[in-house]
Image (tube, rainbow, N blue to C red):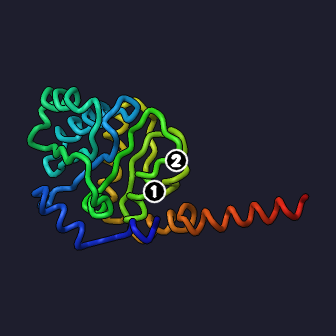
Amino acid sequence: DTDEFKPDRAGRIRVRSEWKIKNESLIGIVARLSVVKALPIFLEAAALLRKKRADLRFVIVGDGPDKRELERLSRELNLTENLIWAGARQDMPAVYNALDILCCCSNSEGFSNVIGEAMACGVPCVVTDVGNSAQIVGDEGIVVPPGNSQMLANGVDALLFKLNALSAFEIRGRIVKQFSLEAMIDATENALTELRLTT
């Protein structure tokens, strides 16, 4: 829903203030905390990035059965000072706007609403090449193989390098043009019209 998920500067400022984010770049993941979402890969990538750069913070938005184990891993990786556990949120458009980069490192996906929602807010994404994720981001994000924390870290690092050159308008535009509710309705109507004409 590109009317609900859209750029929102006030929401960005509010959530980043709540999370005490100042000039750091904020890398986030929005997911149910379960095995298929590959959260350990995100944490390992965060630890790799933290060794290279001091200007990064990370946030995990969501809840689920693996939270305790993931918290233990984050402590082992010395991420305590750099990682925010945001839990489940009801203000997702503002949460997406607070991010500088969204990661989706799942081992399996269908069509990821999270990627579409983040991009509709103008947020660039680093995604694993599963399901329709690569199709959603197109040339407006970075696609990496699943199950590889070094490749995920490299993807985030590459996106950070060109962050200032990216256009939130173009990132959002890809979703509005190809994956919005209006685009889906138009495609469905066209398909039904073609079907009617051939029968």
Secondary element at image label 2: loop
Secondary element at image label 1: helix
* Residue 87 image position (x, y, % from top left): 22, 46
Relative to 74, 186 lies left or right? right
Q: Is residue 149 above or below residue 16?
A: above
Q: Quadrant of residue 41?
A: top left
Q: In the rendered image, is residue 158 in sight?
A: yes
Residue closer to the observer: 56 or 120: 120
Badge 1, how many Cα within 10 Å: few under 14, some, many 20+?
many
Relative to 17, 130 lies left or right? right
Indicate the amino acid at tag 1: Gly
- Which residue was labeled with disc 1? 116
Which residue, as the protein is rendered here, is positioned at the far right? Answer: 199
Residue at image location 15% in from the left, 52% down from the top: 55
Relative to 23, 39 lies left or right? right
* Residue 134 image position (x, y, % from top left): 52, 47
Residue closer to the observer: 20 or 25: 20
Residue at image location 23% in from the left, 33% down from the top: 67
Disc 2/disc 1 C-alpha distance (Å): 9 Å
- Given contact means CB atoms under 8 Å apart, are the residues at marks 2 and 1 in contact? yes
Residue at image location 14% in from the left, 26% down from the top: 76
Q: Quadrant of residue 117?
A: bottom left
User: Which numbered disc covers residue 111?
Assistant: 2
Residue closer to the observer: 157 or 27: 27
Residue closer to the observer: 107 or 124: 107
